[in-house]
Amino acid sequence: MADMAEQELDEVWNQFHSVVNMTSRELHEWLMTESAGEVTEKLPEEMGPETGRHVLEVLGKRRGDLTDDDIGVMRGVVDTVTAERGDDLDPTAGDADWRHRMMNLGHDPLKPLASEQSQARRR
């Protein structure tokens, strides 16, 4: 893992898990659906874009098991989602291509953020 301060790692971890509002199962199913053709499906290790597969791997890891590559992908996902969504992360439809690009990163614009979902479950 990168030689970074614990506080910095906590921040990246929390930001990533805030913007990635799809579960690993939802993301896996989405990547499989996106990769399926009319006649054949891709192998699991080839489904969806590489970043989406890496996000799926990160979702299955504990914070202490992260690699430098994982942290780079996490930062990239946070930067991309926040750049695309701005400060308004309320559920938004947008057009289908945009939504699909976001979903390839584990962020479904139609779902509330992960932090909002956990708050709703506690109520």
Image (cartoon, rainbow, N blue to C red):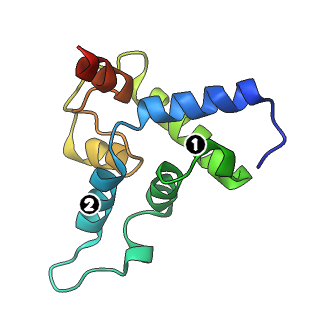
Amino acid under label 2? Answer: Glu
Horizontally, residue 58 falls left or right of residue 9, namely left
> Which secondary structure lies at badge 1?
helix
Residue at 16% in and 86% down: 39
The residue that mark 2 highlights is 29
Amino acid under label 1? Answer: Met
The image shows residue 86 at horizontal and vertical percentages of 43, 21
Horizontally, residue 51 falls left or right of residue 13, namely left
Identify the image quadrant of the C terminus: top left
Does residue 96 sit above or below 112 in this rendering? below
Residue 36 visible in the current orientation: yes
Question: Mark 1: few, some, or many residues within 10 Å (few <14, many ≥20)?
Answer: many
Is there CB contact under 8 Å for labels 1 and 2? no
Residue at 58% in and 34% down: 13
Q: Nearer the viewer, residue 29 or 65?
A: 65
Residue at 21% in and 39% down: 95
Residue 74 is tagged as 1
Does residue 62 sit above or below 15 in this rendering? below
Q: Nearer the viewer, residue 43 or 60?
A: 60
Q: Rounded to the nearest whole Å, what is the CA distance between mark 1 and mark 2?
A: 20 Å
Residue at 27% in and 57% down: 30
The image shows residue 85 at horizontal and vertical percentages of 39, 26
User: Which residue is situated farthest in the right direction here?
Assistant: 3
User: Which residue is situated farthest in the bottom direction here?
Assistant: 39
What count of labels does the image hold? 2
The image shows residue 17 at horizontal and vertical percentages of 47, 34
Residue 66 visible in the current orientation: no
Q: Nearer the viewer, residue 64 or 54?
A: 64
